Image (tube, grey):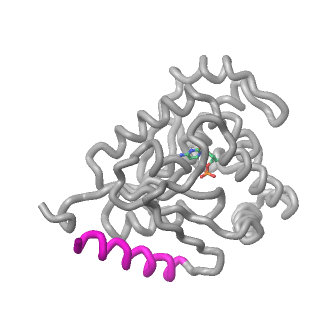
Amino acid sequence: MSKLTKKIVIAIDGFSSCGKSTFAKAIAARLGYIFIDTGAMYRAVTLCAINQGAVSEDLVNEQAVVALLDGVDISFKFNSEREASDVYVNGECVEDQIRSIEVSNCVSRISSIREVREKLVALQQQMGRDRGVVMDGRDIGTVVFPDAELKIFMTADAKVRAERRYAELTAKGDKVTMEEILENVISRDKADMTRAISPLRQAEDAVVLDNSYMSVEEQMEWFMERYESLVKE
Ligand code: DC
């Protein structure tokens, strides 16, 4: 079977607030693939941990987080209005709640817990077992699908990323300042790159996309060139 008819895995990793999900969603729509936002899964576990008092902006009780994992059932359901999948925890849609600044401030500590990663990586591998997926995160090309046929590592200037996130949150009515957003972006970059388990790093066979000054259309053009040259091989 040629690669043109065979469905592949597209792994998109990179820094926070790079527009990975927007890009991955556009690719999935174009190719008729499933899009999986793995950051949403780490955020969903974080939300549960906050609700159960296992983490706050000051401290984390790792044992309590590990203890709640078995009771957390994460799934996605397509939302035709948003043209993307919403994340659910035990049947409840938590898509809006997981984007809060409180969750953003706690998620790095939750995602650095080994048991949390083991559970979510296994779930992600199961979701992508039939290929035909675009998955975005931090460790997709290195850990979840090291055999992904196309790996993209996304990056953008930290200030540009903070401005994008600020616009997104204030549009929703969140009361945030540019300073706290930039601080969150920089501290998450550091936490993502320096954690002991599955730190954020570029896979050797990944192609880099710096989208600081690129529109979504330009990124799509960049992607289609790579995708087409890959499937024509
Ligand atoms: O992509 P995001 O900003 O929504 O991700 C939220 C957090 O989850 C981020 O700080 C790092 C973590 N994460 C991770 O450790 N591994 C992934 N595959 C995806 C996200």
Looking at the picture, does residue 194 appear above or below residue 168?
above
Q: Is residue 59 left or right of residue 133?
A: right
User: Which corner quadrant of the image does residue 34 belong to?
Assistant: bottom left
Q: Residue at x 33, y 58 (%)?
A: 149
| Residue 93 screen position, x and y as percent | 54, 42
Instruction: Answer yes or no: is residue 139 visible.
Output: yes
| Residue 65 screen position, x and y as percent | 65, 23
Q: Which residues are magenta?
A: 216-233
Q: Residue at x 65, y 69 (%)?
A: 156
Q: Quadrant of the N terminus?
A: bottom left
- Residue in the foreground of this view, choosing between 141 and 221: 141
Q: Residue at x 47, y 66 (%)?
A: 207
Looking at the picture, does residue 222 appear above or below residue 12?
below
| Residue 96 screen position, x and y as percent | 63, 50
Q: Quadrant of the C terminus?
A: bottom left
Q: What residue occupies the far left of the structure in this picture?
A: 1
Q: Is residue 69 left or right of residue 100?
A: left
Looking at the picture, does residue 22 appear above or below residue 65?
below
| Magenta span main SS | helix
Instruction: Answer yes or no: is residue 53 visible.
Output: no
Q: Residue at x 71, y 53 (%)?
A: 189
User: Which corner quadrant of the image does residue 116 belong to?
Assistant: top right
| Residue 155 screen position, x and y as percent | 61, 65
